[in-house]
Image (cartoon, rainbow, N blue to C red):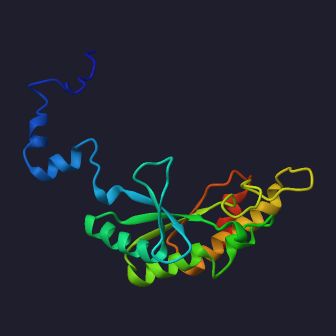
Amino acid sequence: MPKPQIINSSYPNSRPRRMRRDAFSRRLMRENELTAADLILPVFVLEGSKQRQAVPSMPGVERLSIDLLLSEAEQLLRLGVPALALFPVTPPEAKSDDACEAYNPNGLVQRTIQALKKEFPELGVITDVALDPYTSHGQDGLIDADRYVMNDATVQVLVRQALSHAEAGADMVAPAGMMDGRILAIRKAL
């Protein structure tokens, strides 16, 4: 008994040029395309007004105060970049062992979110959910007397931080700290 014939995919049985005939089908089947609409601009925001500070370790990158960030956001949207990710530059006096500034409803990130969404509601605002910008010791978690990171206590602060960002109008929260259970806890709270 002859074997059933499997469709031969070689020429002349296959004519892939037909898929390249029209511009729309070429766009549908191309492998990759990267445009401004696929980008997210990371931005560092700092307290004050008309503040612009170069980041020496990253040539061309600057920390901006909220007022200057609004001008940048306007330019981003004009260029077709749909979103930015906020990273705070917390003043030393606002840092603490318990990182309470992370969830302050009047904190730098929360005020930045509100200002951006008021001026540019169509702009995607993504926030960094992490404690290292807010702790006096620089760890990404709360630490005990032995300087050991307390996972569960940290997760509770990360939840409060994520909630404060959402309440301020963030479109997306991006947990960066490496605490076990943080994603589930944040999802449940949101």
Residue at 72 percent of width and 70 percent of height: 93
Q: How many marks?
A: 0
From the viewer's perspective, tell me whether residue 27 is left or right of residue 35.
left
Residue at 38 percent of width and 79 percent of height: 120
Residue reaching furthest to the bottom? 118
The image quarter in which residue 88 lies: bottom right
From the viewer's perspective, tell me whether residue 27 is left or right of residue 12.
right
Q: Nearer the viewer, residue 144 or 171?
A: 144
In this rendering, the answer to whether 10 lies above or below 151 is above
From the viewer's perspective, tell me whether residue 72 is left or right of residue 62.
left
Q: Nearer the viewer, residue 89 or 167?
A: 89
The image quarter in which residue 83 lies: bottom left
In this rendering, the answer to whether 73 lies above or below 87 is below
Q: Nearer the viewer, residue 166 or 63?
A: 63
The C terminus - image quarter: bottom right
The N terminus - image quarter: top left
Q: Position of residue 106 (x, y in %)?
A: 63, 82
Residue reaching furthest to the top? 1
Q: Position of residue 130 (x, y in %)?
A: 65, 60
Q: Position of residue 86 (x, y in %)?
A: 51, 65
From the viewer's perspective, tell me whether residue 180 is left or right of residue 56.
right
In this rendering, the answer to whether 6 lies above or below 121 is above
Q: Is residue 156 visible?
A: yes
Q: Is residue 160 visible?
A: no
Residue at 29 percent of width and 49 percent of height: 34
Residue reaching furthest to the right? 145
The image quarter in which residue 153 lies: bottom right
Q: Position of residue 75 (x, y in %)?
A: 30, 69
Residue at 51 percent of width and 76 percent of height: 113
